[in-house]
Image (cartoon, rainbow, N blue to C red):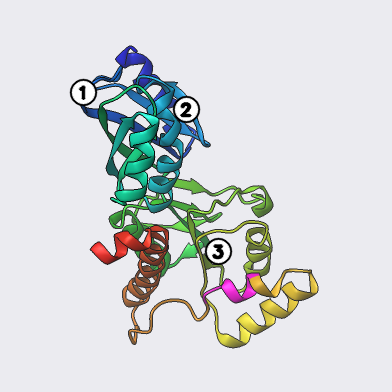
């Protein structure tokens, strides 16, 4: 395997915003075709590049790759390549986390490092044009929190520069594709609340926050119900938005929103970690 082929494949996957896992042999003992540095790229439960030295170790990599992709936490596993008798005995007697016993005549052990790669989590701010200090501060805070910040606003007045700006006055919100890794904040001041929420309702982002009074939010929700938007989706919307820190100034309000988003982000990651990993923490 040539390094430039591997780099090219990784670049291609990253550019497309795909999630994948790179599994690399870091150590071998005994009889094994694998050598340190052998690697595979796992995508959609398939190995799309490389080898770990044969079908024996590769047969167990897919399940382990799925686990690290779900948790977002890299780890090293040890694969024991045992004959059938020893393999069964080891599986029964040795319940060791991150050690896997495979029935084979290959022999030896292989240590494999699994590293998950996921797209940047995106903070999507939907504005209504004109000067909005909360929007401006959220661009700043979002970038500090390692989000890719996208602003959808036909006439923004921003001191901070987002990673992506969609300012087309005629932009159709229904054409925007939200993802499960998006954190969406609606700052449309009533003008485009319903349009934005109806468009988002077709997707399942990680977080949706609506800045609105309780009275306006109740009105928006009633209209959305009439349009066929599910109650489950409406219940997922955070409004009033932000953690209650007694915020008054625009910056404090932005901090409260960023805090709520951070809390949700950490809860998602913790939920993906296996119970055994939680007990280790």
Would you identify the image quadrant in which residue 23 lies? top left
Give the camera-side residue of 107 and 114. 107
Magenta stretch mostly in which secondary structure?
A: helix
Rendering coords of residue 252 (x, y %): 32, 77
The residue beneath circle 1 is 30
The span shown in magenta is: 233-238
Q: How many numbered dots are placed on residues in this image?
A: 3
Q: Is residue 225 above or below residue 181?
A: below
* Residue 15 appears in the picture as rendered: no
- Residue 65 position (above or below residue 160): above
Residue 105, x across and y down, in percent: 36, 23
Image quarter hosting the C terminus: bottom left
Secondary structure of residue under mark 1: loop
Could you tell me how far apart the alpha carbons at marks 2 and 3 are, in whole angstroms? 45 Å
Taking the view exactly as shown, the residue that stands out farthest to the top is 2
In the image, is residue 236 part of the stretch drawn in magenta? yes
In this view of the protein, can residue 267 be seen by the observer? yes
Give the residue pinned by disc 3. Answer: 128
Find out whether the residues at labels 2 and 3 contact each other: C-beta distance under 8 Å.
no
> Is 261 in front, or is 157?
261
Dot placed on the residue nearer the N-terminal end, 3 or 1: 1
Q: Which residue is mark 2?
A: 47
Which of the pair 65/105 is nearer the observer? Answer: 105
Q: Is the residue marked by circle 3 packed among few (<14), some (14-19), or many (20+) residues within 10 Å?
A: many
Q: Secondary structure at mark 3?
A: loop
Closer to the N terminus: mark 2 or mark 3?
A: 2
- The mark nearer the N terminus, 2 or 1, is 1
């Amino acid at each position: 395997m040539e390094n430039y082929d591997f780099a090219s494949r990784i670049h291609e996957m990253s550019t497309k915003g795909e999630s994948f896992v790179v599994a690399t042999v870091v150590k071998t003992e005994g009889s094994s075709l694998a050598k340190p540095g052998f690697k595979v790229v796992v995508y959609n439960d398939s190995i799309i590049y490389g080898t770990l030295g044969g079908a024996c170790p590769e047969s167990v990599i897919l399940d382990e790759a799925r686990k690290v992709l779900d948790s977002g936490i890299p780890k090293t596993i040890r694969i024991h390549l045992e004959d059938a008798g020893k393999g069964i005995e080891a599986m029964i007697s040795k319940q060791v986390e991150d050690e896997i016993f495979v029935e084979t005549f290959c022999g030896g052990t292989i240590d494999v490092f699994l590293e998950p790669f996921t797209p940047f989590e995106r903070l999507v701010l939907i504005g209504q044009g004109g000067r909005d200090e909360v929007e401006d501060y959220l661009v700043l805070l979002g970038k500090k929190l390692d989000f890719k910040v996208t602003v959808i606003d036909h006439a923004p007045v921003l001191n901070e520069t987002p990673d992506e700006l969609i300012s087309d006055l005629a932009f159709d919100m229904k054409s925007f594709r939200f993802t499960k890794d998006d954190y969406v904040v609606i700052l449309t001041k009533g003008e485009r609340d319903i349009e934005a929420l109806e468009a988002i309702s077709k997707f399942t982002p990680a977080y949706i926050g609506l800045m609105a009074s309780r009275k306006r939010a109740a009105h928006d929700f009633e209209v959305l119900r009439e349009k066929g938007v599910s109650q489950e989706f409406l219940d997922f919307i955070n409004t009033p938005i932000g953690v209650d820190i007694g915020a008054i100034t625009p910056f404090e309000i932005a901090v409260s929103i960023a805090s709520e988003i951070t809390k949700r982000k950490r809860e998602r990651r913790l939920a993906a970690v296996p119970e055994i990993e939680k007990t280790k923490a």
